[in-house]
Image (spheres, rainbow, N blue to C red):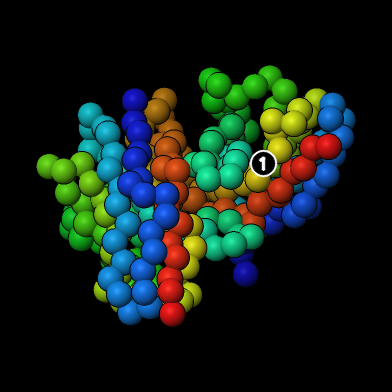
Amino acid sequence: DAMVIQNPRYQVTQFGKPVTLSCSQTLNHNVMYWYQQKSSQAPKLLFHYYDKDFNNEADTPDNFQSRRPNTSFCFLDIRSPGLGDAAMYLCATSRDPGPETQYFGPGTRLLVL
Amino acid sequence: AQSVTQLGSHVSVSEGALVLLRCNYSSSVPPYLFWYVQYPNQGLQLLLKYTTGATLVKGINGFEAEFKKSETSFHLTKPSAHMSDAAEYFCAVSLASGGSYIPTFGRGTSLIVHP
């Protein structure tokens, strides 16, 4: 089945220690998104890629970076995680940047000690 | 700017009862509207969406929603709740922004279904 895969499902890191979350997709979609979701809050868009074009949301902290080496993979790098970065991180894809259906992965829950 | 308001962080119903989850949006142009469901430890899954055309939209698992422009609403309903409907439900609105359509999500409504 075509899908969006996120690894790992749970990630524990230490305060200030860089961490990378990964996302892969078999849907061959052009757009990939990263969301941060905290408890009882709406998913918050961090950035998205349309093919190789990177689009950063204005309020995404500089501490968050992303890479998309090819169509299938996208990475979220947190350079110096703080306690406030503990959250669920959701990866999603859509075929095009229009008002398309988004397909979500199961998420990676990040814990910062 | 677009925004989405979901009234009620929790909605509790009995099995077999009507489900009504409320969503209001603010937008100066016709929006594209979505409902997603999130089961525990899973990602979001599309229930239904409104783009153009018929204002009553039918989705999966017996859910439907009606776009009411005059009320700026897109409420989600299901005639008879099932235990398996217990989940978090998110309403989202999508508007054009620099060539892309970026969705804005509401805070979610947790649906609790009692036996």
Whether residue A70 is visible here, answered yes or no, is: no
Provide the residue designation for mark 1: A87
Which residue corresponds to the image point at 66% horizontal and 51% vertical from the top-left?
A107
Chain at numbered mark 1: A
A44 displayed left or right of A3: left
Count the labels in the image: 1
The picture quadrant where one finds residue B13 is bottom left
Which residue corresponds to the image point at 77% horizontal and 52% vertical from the top-left?
A10
Q: Position of residue B61 (x, y in %)?
A: 39, 73
Which residue corresponds to the image point at 16% horizontal and 43% vertical from the top-left?
B71
The picture quadrant where one finds residue A25 is bottom right
The picture quadrant where one finds residue B27 is top left
Which residue corresponds to the image point at 38% horizontal and 59% vertical from the top-left?
B11
| Dot 1 amino acid type | Ala
A107 displayed left or right of A31: right
**Label 1: how many Cα within 10 Å (few below 14, some 14–19, many 20+):** some
B73 displayed left or right of B94: left
Under tag 1, what secondary structure?
A: strand
- State the residue in front, A72 or A74: A74
Q: Position of residue B62 (x, y in %)?
A: 33, 73
